[in-house]
Image: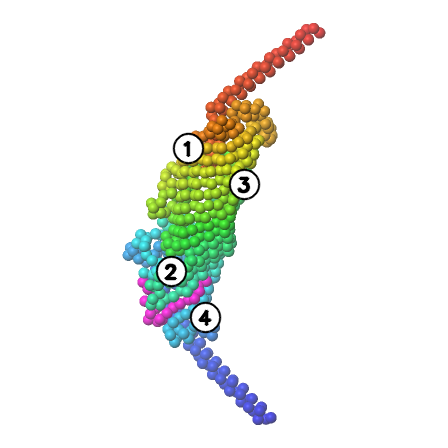
Amino acid sequence: MPDQITKKFNSVKWMALVALVVFLVFGTGFIYFELRIKPLIEQELRELVPRSTEGLYHLDFTGLSINLLTANASLSNVKLIPDPIVLEKLRLLKKAPNNVYHIELRKLSALNFHLFRMFKDKKLNIDEIEINRPMITMVNRQMDYNENRAPRPLKSPYDYISKVLKELSVDTVNFREAAFKYVDNNKAKPIIDSIANLNVTLADWLIDKDSARDTTRMYLLKDIMLNLDDYSYATPDSLYNIHLSEMNFKASTGLLHIDKFELLPRYSEMQFGQKVGYAKDRYSIRMNDLQLAGINLPLYIKKQELFARQMSIGDGAVSVFNNNELEKPKEPKTGKYPHQLLQKVGSKITIQKLDLYHLNIAYAEFDRNSKQKGKITFENTSGTITNITNAPAAKQKNKFMVADLTTYMMGQGKLDTKFTFDLLAEDGAFAYSGLLHGLNGPAMNAVTKPLGMVHIKSGVVDELSFDLKADEHGASGSMVFKYHDLAIAVLKREAGTVWLIRQGFLSFLANNLIINPQNPSKEGILSKAVIDYKRAPDRSFFNLIWKSLFQGIKYSVGVTPQKEAQIKAQVARFEKMKTERDKRRANRQKRRAQRKQEHN
């Protein structure tokens, strides 16, 4: 028994002795590391950045912390700062990059840097670099000499580390909740955009003797992933909020996915124009399941030019409203057709093909005469739009943006339509054609009653085809409208109310003297309408489309300017006869009253 106690005691002594030796060795190593090695690493880090960037950047930090046991390290209060004097020298030498960065962060952590592999093989491999809440400013200025350069360094970074290391790699670099500011310095006045809470993951960053020539890498990286969970901001005019929900991008596939995009007005339909002070289109947009494929990320990084091979929108809604009871806009709406606005976007955009699915479109106006809102809808819209671009090179190859769409007017009539936009036309020239069939006339009352003061009692659209050319001044073309069993009622607003009431005499004249109840006629004669609509400068693109087609419909059913003039003259004669009749009646009543008074 005493022998066992002695053996256990001796074991404890040896374990304590070994622990003491290990402690002394590591303690001495830590002291040596802190006093001699760590200052050298700090010095090398500070010198490496300016050396590898030709003096363009310098790195500043307040402290370096290294834990040899866990193989983790961190830098505190880090700043990557560009030198403006060096930048200007590099521009004169045509060696400066398009983008210059200023980065600030409280802490940069390197996790598991494989210390023994570094000493043994001269390879510094880090599993992860974690950067939380950095503030990144990117200033862009396009340089002609960078136009066709590949997304790789001009000089291999390996030249700067080869004396110390054979390889430097990081499996993953994570930027968490980054605040990103972009400054466009390509115009007289800088344009500044910013975004917050952006997550960026850089995958497989490698510096070795071959990585700079590796065509499968972008800026020494195998992949770049972006994520934005939820983001909202107000537009500069404070009229809208823009909201993005769950955006993800992967550079290796070139695929960007946005779960939901919304343009949300901050004011109700009637408040919107009152807030602006004049009649202005109010947009409400919701798009779900947006995908862009084939994005060229190096092109965007270098030139802020967005190129995508294909885009798709799963479903959504676009609503436009205008209160034309208010005063007209202070400035004309020339130059504000969709393809004209695309040309005014500051950055270059090219989307070769856009696929639309299940999109609901609505245009509404509040009418000053009826005091009611009229609304026309195009539901379940699907189709394609090709060559969406404002890039000069793309427009020289093909100057037309074409939209082929199928929709259901008022949720009923199937409408196949085609828009062809001339992207080079200064007057906003475009053409539109279409074929509509299967629509019941009364379905149009939601727009004809408030905006046309006409109630469609009956009627069936058999087929409506149109072909027009338009620009900023108006639209002209032709329409063939086949229908049957048409009957209408002409309306007016009852004084002092918002009620619309039937005008019996005008309705009788319209149905018996003006309106053609069917087309072709009973005799088989088909009437064709010639459209020549003059656009008021203060009216929008949607208003032009609606009003030009409405003119064709009116002419097709017989409501031509000549017939309108005739009916107005006839109504005027009727009103004159009625006035004279009422006057004679009043005179007779007056004479009767006088005779009665004399008799008494």
Q: Which residues are magenta?
A: 155-174
> What is the CA distance from the residue labelled 4 to the residue labelled 1?
71 Å
Q: Quadrant of residue 509?
A: top right
Question: Which is in the foreground here, disc 1 or disc 2?
Answer: 1
Q: Which mark is residue 476?
A: 1
Secondary structure found at label 1: strand
- Earlier-in-chain disc, 3 versus 2: 2
Mark 4 and 3 residues: CB-CB less than 8 Å, in contact? no
Residue 551 seen in the current view: no
**Residue marked by disc 3:** 411
Q: Quadrant of the C terminus?
A: top right
Q: Which mark is residue 218?
A: 2
- Earlier-in-chain disc, 1 versus 3: 3
Q: What residue sits 59% from the left and 31% below the top?
A: 498
- Earlier-in-chain disc, 1 versus 2: 2
Q: Which mark is residue 427?
A: none
Disc 1: CA contacts within 10 A as few (<14), some (14-19) or many (>=20): some
Q: Is residue 483 above or below residue 424?
A: above
Q: What residue sits 39% from the left and 57% below the top?
A: 101
> What is the CA distance from the residue labelled 1 to the residue labelled 2?
52 Å
Three-letter code, disc 1: Ser
> What is the CA distance from the residue labelled 2 to the residue labelled 4?
25 Å
Q: Which mark is residue 112?
A: 4
